[in-house]
Image (cartoon, grey):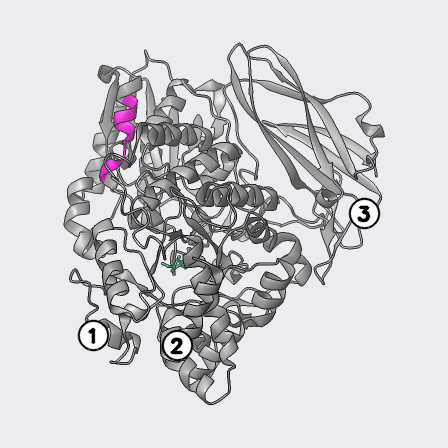
Amino acid sequence: MEKNKLKEILNTLSLKEKIAQTVQLNGDLFTDSGVMPTGPLKDLGLPDNFDIHQVGSIYNVNDPEKLRMIQEQAINKSSHGIPLLFMSDIIYGFRTIFPLPLAQAGSYDFDLIQKAAEITAKESYLSGIHCVFSPMLDVVRDPRWGRVMESPGEDIYTGKEYAKSVVTGYQGQVKDYVSENHVAACIKHFAAYGAPEAGREYSTVDMSNQRLFNEYLPTYQAAIEAHALLVMTAFNVLNGIPSTGNKWLNRDILREKFNFSGLLVSDHSATEELQAHGFTANQEESAKASIEAGVDFDMMTSVYANGLEPLILSGKVDEALLDEAVWRILKLKNKLGLFENPFRGLDQENTGEFLTAEAKETAVELVEKSCVLLKNKENALPLSTQQKIAVIGPYGKSKFTLGFWASVSGKAQDTVTLKEGLENNFAKKNLTFATGYNLFDSYESFGPLKTGIEHLNGPIGDEKELIEEAVEVAGNSDVILLTIGEQFLESGEGASKAKLSLPDKQIRLIKALAQLDKPIIGLLYTGRPLVLTEIEPYFSSLLLVWYPGTMGGAGIANLLSGQASPSAKLTMTFPRSEGQIPIYYAQNTTGRPLNEENKNTRFVSKYSDESNEPLYAFGTGLTYNQVDVKWLENMENLTFTESNQIKLAYQLENLSNETSHAVVHLYMRDMAASIVQPFRKLVASQFIKIEPSTKEELAVTLTKEDLSFSDNQGEWHFESGKFGFYLVAYGQEEELIISL
Ligand code: GLC
């Protein structure tokens, strides 16, 4: 629609109609007849005369027919026939569920990540969804927090690359409209929600501005530079001011400094929660604080619906602020072509467009490239097809491997189980299975879903009997494949934990199986780093599969049989104990760094009862093949080119007689700076496929910007001096010191 016509709509809307456009409600409130029952509306505090057909957006309805019906009602019953915006929590897949973001990012195959996002966008588009509430780009360094599962992890470079790939995959390459088979990206949660004090959900976030600018804002900024069309506010207080009511954060930084012109949506009830934070005294003050902070959509509260009209009529809030919000809402709807086609995506023939062969193949490849081989003593992996394999643990057959957010649109029934994958790669006669322990201790917490989940997952067994059966089955095998970890509801939102070790029932099983003195291969299903220190010694090999998604069983079986070789890296540090948290690789050295010489002295930066080292560091990951990296000659004499770039060249050699995928990491350290810089900082990665027994010369080009850091005012600086560069590939590190 032409801009002037769009502006005409804005200018002819009444005050009530404009306010209604800023309200976003959960589509569950719409009954099958399309009309919202007054009960839930009252619970929300919406006035009886509030016309739900005038709202701007609904979310989390993924049924095309229901969306069509709701849209028809909105257009027919609202005064200007303005179409609704349909949004949804599609975080890592729509119907084809991919591995968790925390897993995907570890593939460092950003082209593949983008392709998975494209598939997700197409499946969402064909279901009538216009915008997805992802990628989540909160940097995370505390595994006690349950939402680390939906983040690309602790590292800034990794998060930025993930952000660009997913936003581009969702929105496509076009900038001024969202073409078919694509959807708008709503990045979240702005800002720094991933740094809650004590790892407790919704807890306070407080940090220096230099840390915010250097470590917690760059992932969002990278998404905005990739033209993300929406941002969602965070629940948390940031340095004393709740993000949702934070003018400095949302106007000075997001809109001015990051030049964001898109739409800002509050997180669920976050405007209302300004009162609970103790930031506002009542709903009207919450409305004032939120609209002045630039929040355009009020998600699932009556704060705007009740608060804005009296504020504007009394002159306490300038109506121009409301016009600004509604204008952004109308522009987004226009970018999606909704005025010309409010049934965008719904008018396609969906026949067989979900879980296509391409989608499944992409998902299998992403599983293979996201699973991290943490340990592989005596090359116990890959398994041989001659071995008799006892598959112990509920994940041998469970379909609940999709992770917390997948249930919004994914279906556990679609999942390829580990058993199905193994039976595809190994002779069935060589495979035996035993549950070993209950994945869920009870089904009661599933409420109305209880029957379906119990049917799909099977009855709760007696723990003692399950162990006895497992030991018996394992006793008749050559090798034990043991699935351990969390069940999917133990991570995600509202799932902070103070203890991160495995449950006693799993530890009892591990110890019972260890008595058999057979090699135990561990498959770790989890949405967060766990504390595995006690049980790690029992395993010959340990493969971290995170929550691998719909095609998990197929991808994992390919890795276990050697059809594919692991190449992924850890995106988040695994602590030895909770007491080390927050623990992450990019730490400052301190003035008294621990080293071999001073390790037995007292006054050094260390613990008296624990190592400084994690169990598995960020970047850990083994491969079946062997590769070698080394710098090319004369790299130490490098200087900046006229365009302020340096080209760091190295050689990668594949020493094995198999084609190998290799992830090479390049870290740096600014040895002396006016704001102390981390001991190591990842600045580049390369994902390379290299033929057997060959050498390749490769290079990474860095700019001064890549070697810069921010001060407390958000200004970035490059300071000349000595820099360390570290080439890392599968346990090997090659140092290069250059003065720049
Ligand atoms: C939730 C989450 C957010 C999600 C939103 C809508 O509370 O914090 O990530 O997109 O509400 O469901």
Q: Which residue is mark 3?
A: 672
Residue 89 lies, in percent from the top left, at: 36, 53
Nearest the viewer among 180 and 428 is 180
**Which portion, as a residue range, is magenta?**
413-422
Closer mark to the observer between disc 3 and disc 2: 2
For badge 3, the amino acid type reads Ala
What quarter of the picture does the N terminus occupy?
Answer: bottom left
Q: Is residue 117 left or right of residue 515?
A: right
User: Residue 303, labelled with which disc?
Assistant: 2
Q: State the residue at coordinates (31%, 65%).
A: 81
Separation of disc 3 and disc 2 at Cα? 50 Å
Q: Is residue 46 left or right of residue 581?
A: left
What quarter of the picture does the C terminus occupy?
Answer: top right
Separation of disc 2 and disc 1 at Cα? 17 Å
Element type where label 3 sits in the image = loop
For badge 2, the amino acid type reads Val
Separation of disc 3 and disc 1 at Cα? 63 Å
